[in-house]
Image (tube, coloured by chain):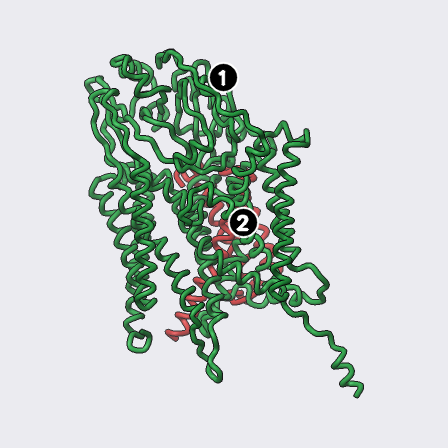
Chain colours: A red, B green
Amino acid sequence: MRLETASEPVFFWGGLLAGAVWAVLLWMQLPGNTPGPEKLGRTAGVVGLALSSGLAWLLWAHVFGAVTAFFCLGGLGMVLLCIMPILWAILISTQSHTS
Amino acid sequence: MKGSQGRDRRPVPPQPHPSAVLWLRLGIGGLLAALFIMAACWADITLPCFRPYGMTGFCLLMTGACLAGITGLTLCIGLGPWQKLQHLAIRYRALHGWIGITTGTLLSMSFLAGTMTLFAAPLQQWSQPPLPDHGALPLADIPATLDQILTSRTEDLPSIFPGLHYRVGLKTSDTATLSIPTGPELPLGLPASHILISLPASHTPSLHQLTLSPVPTFIGGLHRRLGLPLPENWAMPLVGTVCLLYGLALLSGVILLLPGIWRHLMSVRLQGHSRRLWLDLHSLLGLCSLPFHLIIALTTALFAFSPLLYPVSSGHDGIQQATAREMPSASSLLPPEKALSFLHELAPDFHPLTLDYVLSPHGTDSQAERLALHAPLYNANGERSLPPAGQSYLLAEGTDLQNPLIGRDRGAVLLTPETGHLIDSQNLPGQQTPARRILTWCLALHFGSFGGEFVRWLYVALGLCGVGFFHAANQLWLNTHRRRKPGQTSCVETPATLWLGRLSEGTLLGCLLGLCGIIAISPLMTHLTPIPHLSSVSTPDMEHSYQQTSLAYHGLIALTLVSYCLLPRALCRGIILALAAFCLSGAVTIVLMRHTAVQTPLAAELTIAFSFASLALWAGSLLTLYRWKQVAPTGR
């Protein structure tokens, strides 16, 4: 991460944060065993998704270029969507064991 | 009566295909896929509109043909009337499972080795012994230093270096390392030993011979051949076929998931029957990383089939004979600073890493050379990737954060070494034609060669998720095929599930142990020896080192499989994980003791990654052994 963090650190880390928010919001909108907070309605979720993905793409387009930023965001989304449900299941299972 | 007639008229739910029909459909689908691939070759030879694109056009046609082949194969299985999605899905169920269990282990080994191949270049740097001090030379001093070395024993040089090749490795904007490879080199092929030139305070250049490790090349080969111990040209047709089936399994998996996709999409149910857990994990990992798996299936089919078909399609010119020329002096060539400023003007986003001055007569990049050096047979540049043997060239390789790279971790441009005129810029990031750019994106999405280090780590995560995906597929198949005892909820192993279970887990963990084992010996296979002058260079037997690495790896796999046949599975799992952790910890210790763990930023990154990986393996091993001990009286 030397080159990308060295040249544009604010844009890179900002994009990473916005991308992570996007992936979490997407995960919460999908069906199955997700946290799905009650206060986050469908419309708010979709608006949040659009805003966070747009922001992440804009920030990363500055670091990686427009097309590369799109694929980077896709890769980050895939990784987080693969990992988050597993971590969530372990967390829920540990909590139910301890309570 | 009326009700009973109504019940009789209820349509009978469609049954899965009988095995004969399934084989027939698979055969027809396979023929269709072969037809698409042959049509791509035919179009490349015959249609004039594709000729100007050369290898790029051929590769894009082949990618399209492989995509059409996978889609055709999937359609052939499901063809026929259906009313509900479940009825269509039922036609794919058996085939999806059989493809999974027959290819899953091979693909999981390939993904594991592929994750390591992402670090091929850093692993080579990490394995190196401490390099001599004063190795970074001012760019301006390089031509004079080279002339000083090359003119000292000129009469010996042609016999040692028939075509002189020297490499300027850029360290900072005005310093670089200088080395002379002693043999031909190809990307991810067996490395030649290098003569490192350093300039101590006395201003008399000192020489060291650096012998590199064959381990990154071996891991790369393992990844490309799906872990099969076969020569590359024999393995490729099999790899291509496996990839078409892998594509079919991916598409059929989506069809199988579609009927109930919205119910448990993001659920991982840890409690309950283990079959449900493996199903959840397999569906989650497969669906969330589907685009990644599709691009891997498609590009691997391209890598496997195109070396077999391109010579047929292109009718290549054959190898051009080299003509010996008088060796020019280094100071008569384009100085590195001028080459760099020219490259900056040409492509401002391109960051050059190395400048290779290759003077004639030099070797050519042919299939025979690639086989000899254990390099990938696929070559995106075709048979004419290098200038003719009689023409000198300057190869500048580097990275670009804004654009995809066609190589595993770098793009390249060819210049004339005397004047700096462009010879070939088709692989220069940001300066490509639209067709070449599309092909570059296809390859970059396989290699993860875009977005710098960040994407490399994303690909590590995706690769490991891929290993989990195939392992979950195997476990799911085994759980489904265990026989249920009448009147009981527990299942018993059949001989098939027992041995397949041991084989699939043993092979995967054996691959892990083998990889950790050869990483541990990698630093021991590199040497740095001082040499008085160029004529005292010795040629190390890299093929022998490669065979030793291969023997170590396959020995460890065999050991794992034998222990899986003889010992309880959980005990075996714990022992193998502990051995893998021991090897990786040993490798980190060796490198730390040699003070090379943080020699370069990449080496430091790899040291940290290996330390975390060995800790995770130790934790996994201890947990497995603890659990085994708890259930031992009944579980053995």
Q: Residue furthest bottom?
A: B1
Q: Position of residue B142 (x, y in %)?
A: 32, 18
Type of residue at label 2? Thr
Disc with the residue nearer the chain's start (1 vs 2):
2
Type of residue at label 1? His
Q: Residue furthest right?
A: B2
- The N terminus of chain A: image quadrant: top left
Q: Position of residue A74 (x, y in %)?
A: 53, 48
**Alpha-carbon neighbours of circle 1 within 10 Å: few (<14), some, or many (≥20)?**
some
Q: Residue at x 24, y 35 (%)?
A: B527
Residue B118 in sight in this render: no
Q: Position of residue B347 (x, y in %)?
A: 50, 26
Q: Give me the chain letter of mark 2.
A: B
Q: Secondary structure at mark 2?
A: helix
Numbered label tally: 2
In the visual, does B485 lie left or right of B145? right
Q: Give me the chain letter of mark 1.
A: B
Q: Nearer the viewer, residue B553 or A52?
A: B553
Both labels 1 and 2 in a single chain: yes
Mark 1 — residue?
B421
Query: Marks 1 and 2, Cα distance to the nearest angstrom?
Result: 43 Å
